[in-house]
């Protein structure tokens, strides 16, 4: 299995290698879901400043988190035939480069959170802690897959806090109005694409004493991923109803489920690379659909 979303040939430009190293496209894929949190709680398009700061926080946290992930797994990746072309393994990006990127990423994230509102800033260390501890969890528990998935859910949560913090002065009130159905739906969705990344490495992970649901469940891991994604679609439909979304929201949820079903089909045929990316595309459809639905204000009055 040669597919690796973080691999890059040494014969390409340094900028391209850096983009592959950070998997920067996944930041863009997560952005509609972060905006979803803000759109749903405000029931309108957030201000330009809020939209820019949500993007900025997500972008810088991606830099810190993905770099830390690569740095923590450098020795493991060097032994895995599937991940030997990762830039930190080949030396195209050095350990010193990686540490500098982490500093830049965390600094940019905290500054962005501070500029959003006080509650976003106060919560930012806890969010950073969740993101930065992820790569170490698979040394201890299969629930590392849910740890990674929760980071995707945090995007929705953070978007909501960014918007709500400008309206309410109480943290409890802000937490109450967070669209938790969409947060949890996103976690179940993300569990699937994370397992598409782990299932091809089951035998290697066993040798390295690494933990995941792919290792724990063996041949049943793919069905477990599918079950989580069915749960994601059910919760998204409940969220559409609970948050009074219109036809665009419901149609986007249907498409979200259909694309995930196709990704599952690809994974069942061993095409985990395409399954991984199709699963990510499904979140773009859901996030953009909900954002557009609320922007148009149908049927909410």
Image (cartoon, helix red, strand yellow):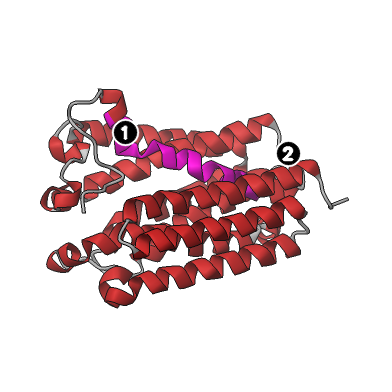
Determine if residue 228 is in view. yes
Image quadrant in which the N terminus is located:
bottom left
Q: Earlier in the sequence, mark 1 or mark 2?
A: 2
**Helix, strand or loop for the magenta stretch, by majority:** helix
| Label 1: few (<14), some (14–19) or many (≥20) C-alpha neighbours in 10 Å | many
The circle on residue 45 is 2
Q: Could you tell whether 11 is left or right of 48 in the image?
A: left
Residue at image x 63%, y 57%?
Answer: 253
Which residue occupies the extreme right position in the image?
A: 301
Q: Residue 248 appears at what percent x and percent y?
A: 72, 50
| Label 2: few (<14), some (14–19) or many (≥20) C-alpha neighbours in 10 Å | some
Q: Residue 136 appears at what percent x and percent y?
A: 27, 58
Residue 25 included in the magenta stretch of the image: yes
Which residue is denoted by mark 1 in the rendering?
101
Rendered image quadrant of residue 272: bottom left
Q: Residue 273 appears at what percent x and percent y?
A: 33, 51
Determine if residue 164 is in view. no
Q: What segment carries the magenta color?
A: 17-37
Helix, strand, or loop for circle 1? helix
Q: Nearer the viewer, residue 95 or 111?
A: 95
Which label lies toward us, 1 or 2? 2
Helix, strand, or loop for circle 2? loop
């Amino acid at each position: 299995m040669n597919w690796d979303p973080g691999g890059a040939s040494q014969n390409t430009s340094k900028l391209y290698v850096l983009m592959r190293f950070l998997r920067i496209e996944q930041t863009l894929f997560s952005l509609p879901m972060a905006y979803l949190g803000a759109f749903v709680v405000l029931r309108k398009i957030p201000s330009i400043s809020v939209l820019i700061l949500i993007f900025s926080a997500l972008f810088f946290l991606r830099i810190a988190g993905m770099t830390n992930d690569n740095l923590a797994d450098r020795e493991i990746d060097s032994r895995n035939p599937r991940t030997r072309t990762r830039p930190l393994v080949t030396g195209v990006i050095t350990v010193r480069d990686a540490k500098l990127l982490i500093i830049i990423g965390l600094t940019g994230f905290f500054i962005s959170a501070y500029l959003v509102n006080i509650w976003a800033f106060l919560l930012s260390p806890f969010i950073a802690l969740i993101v930065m501890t992820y790569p170490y969890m698979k040394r201890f528990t299969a629930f590392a897959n849910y740890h990674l998935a929760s980071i995707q859910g945090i995007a929705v949560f953070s978007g909501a806090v960014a918007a709500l913090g400008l309206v309410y002065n109480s943290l409890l009130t802000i937490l109450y109005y967070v669209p938790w159905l969409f947060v949890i739906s996103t976690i179940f969705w993300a569990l699937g694409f994370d397992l598409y990344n782990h299932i091809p490495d089951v035998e290697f992970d066993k040798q390295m004493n690494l933990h995941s649901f792919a290792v724990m469940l063996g041949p049943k891991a793919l069905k477990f991923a599918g079950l989580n994604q069915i749960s994601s679609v059910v919760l998204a439909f409940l969220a559409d109803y609970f948050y009074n979304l219109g036809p665009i929201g419901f149609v986007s949820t249907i498409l979200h489920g259909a694309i995930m079903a196709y990704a599952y089909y690809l994974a069942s045929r061993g095409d985990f690379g395409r399954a991984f990316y199709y699963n990510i595309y499904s979140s773009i459809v859901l996030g953009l659909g909900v954002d557009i639905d609320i922007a148009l204000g149908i049927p909410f009055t």
